[in-house]
Amino acid sequence: MNKLPFDKFLEQALKRNKVKQTHPEILVRGIEMVRRCYDEGIYILFTDGLRTDIDQAKLFGQSRKNYWYKGVNYSAPEKPWVTNAEPGTSFHNFGLALDYVLTDATAKPVFWTRNKQWERAAAIAKELGFSWGGDWPAKIRDNPHIEYNGGLSINQIRAGKMPVFKPFASTNKKGELTMDQYNELKKLIEVQATKIKTLEATKADVQSNNAVGASHKEAWDWAIKEGLVRGDGSKNMNPAGVLTREQMVTMLKRYHDKCKQ
Ligand SMILES: [Zn+2]
């Protein structure tokens, strides 16, 4: 027996009967259920997901005589009973339900017997917010069935309401960082932070009007007051800016003109 790695196992678990077309909030919880079970050595796969009204009519017609839906006869008395829900009356019809069954680590056989593992899988589904058909009264009990109703009745769903999906903590270890990756990332962030600090310090030196050294302060204030030094054109006095030859000539002329007055 070849145990499938989780990725491959999951592919098998989701491939049937529009499981992937269920509501995205149902699908992510279904995937989480498969993962949590897998991690406990319990192997489940989904046999049914979204059902259109026609899909539902076909299923309802199984085991029944003379069943018509929208002018079509879906009776199939020779087939086994599947459901008591007519089209539009099942949470499957709204993408809010899944049916599961036990398998093994190869995802090939299916085991329909409700046992400890089956019930543990149901408990995991309930942790994720699902209601379980195995809890229903004997007459309508449906062991494979889980649905996310959020306390709403099927009639409320038919009227357009949707359950509120409560968040859950994913156990997806693949999505988490290893300690090595975390440390590597932390180091990178520290290097970047140092670079940013250096850049900011340089910027402050160039741009700030308050960065005049103590020994130049008196002369700097005098030069501004006398109008010898003016802004650098970017609304900054820029005391640490480099002086060009033309700027020096302008400053000298200003000084000269001032002395002549
Ligand atoms: Zn079901």
Image: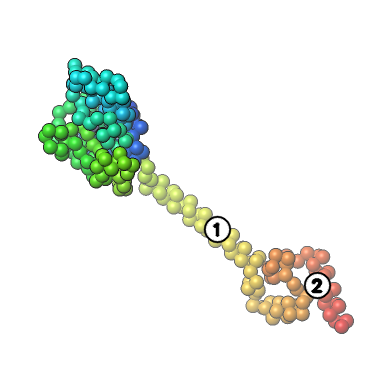
Q: Which residue ends up furthest to the left in the rendered image? A: 138
Q: Which residue ends up furthest to the top in the rendered image? A: 78
Who's the residue at 15% across and 34% down the image? Answer: 141
- SS class of the residue under badge 1? helix
Q: Which residue is mark 1?
A: 196
Residue 78 point in image, percent of width and height: 19, 16
Residue 195 point in image, percent of width and height: 55, 57
The amino acid beneath tag 2 is Met
The amino acid beneath tag 1 is Ile
Q: In the shown orientation, is residue 66 left or right of residue 241?
A: left
Quarter in which the N terminus is drawn:
top left
| Count of marks placed on residues | 2
Q: Nearer the viewer, residue 98 or 198?
A: 98
Q: Nearer the viewer, residue 80 or 220?
A: 80
Report the disc number at residue 251: 2
Residue 102 shows in this picture:
no
Mark 2 surroundings: few (<14), some (14-19) or many (≥20) residues within 10 A: some
Who's the residue at 23% across and 31% down the image? Answer: 85
Q: Which residue ends up furthest to the right in the rendered image? A: 260
Who's the residue at 54% across and 61% down the image? Answer: 197
**In terms of image quadrants, where is residue 96?**
top left
Residue 210 point in image, percent of width and height: 63, 73
